[in-house]
Image: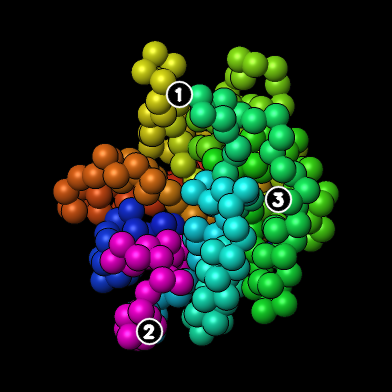
Amino acid sequence: MPRYYLTGFADEAAKDLDGQIRATQELGWRDIESRNIGGTNIHDLGDAEFDGVCGKLADAGVRINCFGSAIANWNKQIDQPFESSLAETRRAIPRMQRLGTRLVRIMSFAVRKDAAGADLPDQMEEERFRRVRELYRMFTDAGIVPVHENCMNYGGMSWRHTLRLLDNVPGLKLVFDTGNPVFTDDRSRPAPHPKQSAWEFYEHVREHVAYVHIKDGRWDAAANKPVFTHIGEGDGDVRRILADLLGRGYAGGISIEPHLAVVYHDPTQQCEDAVRYANYVEYGRRLMRLLAEIEAGP
């Protein structure tokens, strides 16, 4: 039976590619889910820089299994022109083909809000579906598999929103993030919206999951902010979800996104290089121990 493989957002270990490769090899892995290299997304690197990336990866025997792109993410508004997302996609495709990267993480554009920060009743669903269908077509025509993440975007508003997206973008697959539901309001339930359940979300979408992000944490209601934790120490139902995946014969990627030392979209969460590197490696080791325990059985 084909077995899962391990990977991670190695830009949480180091900004530069050398450090990202070193952390990956220290864990005994061969894959990186690439988001930023030297602080720059793959589709925004200059040609010479990208050539250097390809050379270093080849020399190290490390591959980019998935491109954690910014395409249609929480920073892109659905009521703004589509061209920026199309341009990123056109730049990403040839680079992914050169790297032999088959997966690309995409999203479904930011949640529409009013000036006070409340969700707008009209989320422009039909325009979202149209745009995601176009992105899906561009990638699949190029032999690349787009996977949608339940992050701070339309599809992340609830498992019901994700299923509605899938109904309207036939063939689209998911990357399921175990930690995101813990910190995200369930917009399918009446206000004031409760936070989502990671297990409930996963249970309703698992038939569509082709890739997994592992993070964990708790919601600190008093401080109104997330608290990220090591695997199994939060409310992300990580052990239960991984056990279910393995029990179903899951053979895709399991990618760590610790957020313990660095939160990609929160520049205030930064720390010394050695600490971020050590946190990333320790997180990977804990994932491997947890998987070994699950495989060993009760």
Crowding near pointer 1: few (<14 within 10 Å), some, many (20+)? some
The answer for how far apart the CA atoms under marks 3 and 1 are is: 29 Å
Crowding near pointer 3: few (<14 within 10 Å), some, many (20+)? many
Tag nearer the camera, 3 or 1: 3
Tag nearer the camera, 1 or 2: 2
- Compared with residue 206, is residue 138 higher up or lower down, i.e. above or below? below
Residue at 43 percent across and 57 percent down: it is 8
Residue at 72 percent across and 43 percent down: it is 124
- Compared with residue 133, is residue 54 higher up or lower down, i.e. above or below? below
Screen quadrant of the C terminus: top right
The answer for how far apart the CA atoms under marks 1 and 2 are is: 42 Å
Magenta segment includes 269: no
The percent coordinates of residue 13 (x first, y second) are 30, 56
Residue underneath mark 3? 128
Magenta segment includes 54: yes
Element on which disc 3 rests: helix
Residue underneath mark 1? 219
The answer for how far apart the CA atoms under marks 3 and 2 are is: 31 Å
- Compared with residue 15, is residue 213 higher up or lower down, i.e. above or below? above
Precedes in sequence: disc 3 or disc 2: 2
Q: Toward which corner of the image does residue 197 lie, by quadrant?
A: top right
- Compared with residue 9, is residue 59 higher up or lower down, i.e. above or below? below
Element on which disc 2 rests: helix
The percent coordinates of residue 120 (x first, y second) are 64, 30
The reply, left or right, for residue 261 in relation to residue 79 is left
Residue 47 badge = 2
Residue 148 visible to an observer of this rendering: yes
Element on which disc 1 rests: strand
What's the amino acid at mark 2? Asp
